[in-house]
Amino acid sequence: MRKLWTAVVAAIVISVAVAGIAIAENRYEVPKSLIGANPGVKGSVKDPVPAKLRFGFTVEDTENLRPQVVEEYRIAAEGLQSFPDARPTCPFNKAGDPLIGDPRDLSRACRKAIVGKGTIHNEFGAPTDRSQKATCDVKITLMNVSSGDPRFPTTIPQIRKRGGLAIRIDQYVTEEGVDDGSRCPPTDIHGAIAAPFYDVKIEGISTAELRFGVPTTLTHPSTLDNSVREVASTVNKLKGKAKVRGKERTVGFYSLVGRKGKTRTTRVTFIDESGVKKTATQKK
């Protein structure tokens, strides 16, 4: 009986001790200041309304450490459908050419395929010390692409089927056109992520969702851990012709096709390297 009582007490002590330990984890938010799409306009599946879309998010750590590395994202805004056939495209391998240091030097076809831009604020450091928070700010260029990334084989048939974006990432350059390496890890950061569209529903409304995995060249440059802290981007209101229910119509690259209620829900899903999956939403 004494042994049993001792074991019970020990278990209670261990439980209390574990409960008192704060476990650091990522905290995700979709701030209202970073999102928006033609407020006041509803749109419909039958009559899509060309739209300008802003989307972004923030990532923090509950213990004020550098956040865990996120390797997969899914981004969607309720009632925002994509019509990639309405705009020029370029091949993914051209959009992500790592030998090009400035998007202005991309091929003419890829420059015509640009639909938006934005910025990413990162923190990087040694994998063994998440208190290190060196900063790395990069710019992103969003391009309408016709092909996927061989590093992520599932992007190839999905982009061929539904279209997608190349999220091109570049270090900032000086006025002389050279890399400002002081902002980022000691390696050139120039390349792209293939992000296919998938058809989903948010609040029961037809929606296009971007899904993409991040290559290790970006999550672990120079063997470091690179954590995204904030993304802010804009897809411009660009028009073109595409088939809607069998009829050719003028639409936007992104178009509004409806919403439930007076606000739209923006939804971002994050999957970190440990496999933890979390979703953040915001209405606006």
Image (cartoon, rainbow, N blue to C red):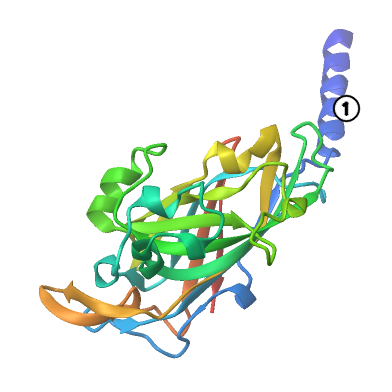
Q: Nearer the viewer, residue 9 or 58?
A: 58
Which residue, given by chain and number where applicable, does mark 1 sit on? 13
Q: Is residue 87 left or right of residue 120?
A: left
- In this view, the residue in front, 53 or 19, is 53
**Residue 139, image x, y percentages:** 60, 62
Residue at the location (86% across, 39% down)? 20
Instruction: Identify which residue is drawn at 39% across, 59% down.
Output: 165
Q: Which image quadrant is residue 107 in?
A: bottom left
The C terminus appears in which quarter of the rendering? bottom right
Residue drawn at point x = 64 percent, y = 37 percent: 220
Q: Quadrant of the N terminus?
A: top right
The picture places residue 131, in percent across and down from the top left corner, at: 84, 43
Residue type of the residue flagged with mark 1 = Val
**Secondary structure beneath label 1:** helix
* Residue at far bottom of view: 40
Q: Position of residue 140 (x, y in %)?
A: 55, 61
In front of the other: 201 or 150: 150
Q: Quadrant of residue 124?
A: top right
What crowding class fits label 1: few (fewer than 14 Cα within 10 Å), some (14-19), or many (20 or more)?
few
Splitting the image into 4 quarters, where does residue 11 fall? top right
The answer to whether residue 17 is left or right of residue 156 is: right
Q: Is residue 277 left or right of residue 68?
A: left
Q: Is residue 276 visible?
A: no
